[in-house]
Amino acid sequence: MRVSGPAGPIGLLIVDDHPVVRDGLSSMFARDPEFEVLGEAADGAEAVRLAQALRPDVILMDLRMPGMDGVSAIRELAERGSEARVLVLTTYDTDSHVLPAIEAGATGYLLKDAPRDELSRAVRAAARGEAVLAPSVAALLMNRVRAPVPGPLSPREVEVLQLVASGATNREAAARLFLTEATIKSHMLNIYAKLGVNDRAAAVTEAFNRGLLVPRPPEQP
């Protein structure tokens, strides 16, 4: 890794498939003597190659790019032992984008609508090895930590779902199990939460996919 801080500027590699974005970021950081733009890349594969050659302190990494995407590039850099800090800069802040990037080894995660001052501070922090997260990303990760981990279905919940799979209504399942209809509804809500679904049909399908339910053989006449 290059020497940054008091001994020299922070070396940057800017990775984005849109030339206008790369030009804008390059111009912004080039005006500040605290930073030095070492290179630009239009996809993940080029980013990995340039990171090995230029040894930047911080890589500003987009996620959605043709060819090798940002997450794959972050993972490849980690596998190659790159010491560069990767600061994701993207427009996406959903679970499906944030979590893979963080798990792959990104130091920080910012959105492209971040103010210039915030972006500059984030790059400085990333160069020091500090985690940097956009507020919406921090909130998402906090909610993930706080969310209870779904447990396995209880024997009673499997029993209820088996009846539902056979076509029973809540009222019919309640009668078969000597429970109230409200209790059956409560069981179904718990089942939805544990299986990550929103309706009866999806719950039955997911249960079969997971092997929680076994198709019953047809009854003999």
Image (cartoon, helix red, strand yellow):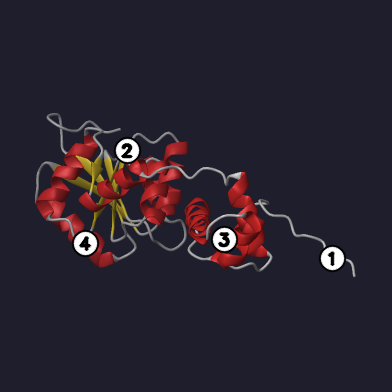
Q: Position of residue 73 (x, y in %)?
A: 42, 49
Marks 1 and 2: which is nearer the front?
A: 1
Q: Position of residue 191 (x, y in %)?
A: 52, 54
State the separation of the CA atoms marked 4 and 3. Answer: 49 Å
State the separation of the CA atoms marked 1 and 2. Answer: 64 Å
* Residue on which disc 1 sits: 219
CA neighbours of label 2 inside 10 A, class few (<14), some (14 to 19), many (20+): many
Marks 4 and 1: which is nearer the front?
A: 1
User: First in sequence: mark 3 or mark 1?
Assistant: 3
Residue at 78% across / 60% down in the picture?
216
Secondary structure beneath disc 1? loop
Task: Please say whether residue 25 is visible from this viewpoint.
Answer: yes
User: First in sequence: mark 1 or mark 2?
Assistant: 2
Depth check, front residue: 165 or 111: 165
State the separation of the CA atoms marked 4 and 2. Answer: 21 Å
Q: Position of residue 145 (x, y in %)?
A: 35, 41
* Residue on which disc 4 sits: 23
* Residue on which disc 2 sits: 84
CA neighbours of label 1 inside 10 A, class few (<14), some (14 to 19), many (20+): few
Q: Are marks 3 and 2 in contact (CB under 8 Å)?
A: no
As displayed, is residue 34 above or below residue 192? above
State the separation of the CA atoms marked 3 and 2. Answer: 44 Å
Q: Quadrant of the N terminus?
A: top left
Q: Amino acid at mark 4?
A: Asp
Q: Is residue 50 left or right of residue 169?
A: left
User: First in sequence: mark 4 or mark 3?
Assistant: 4
* Residue on which disc 3 sits: 203
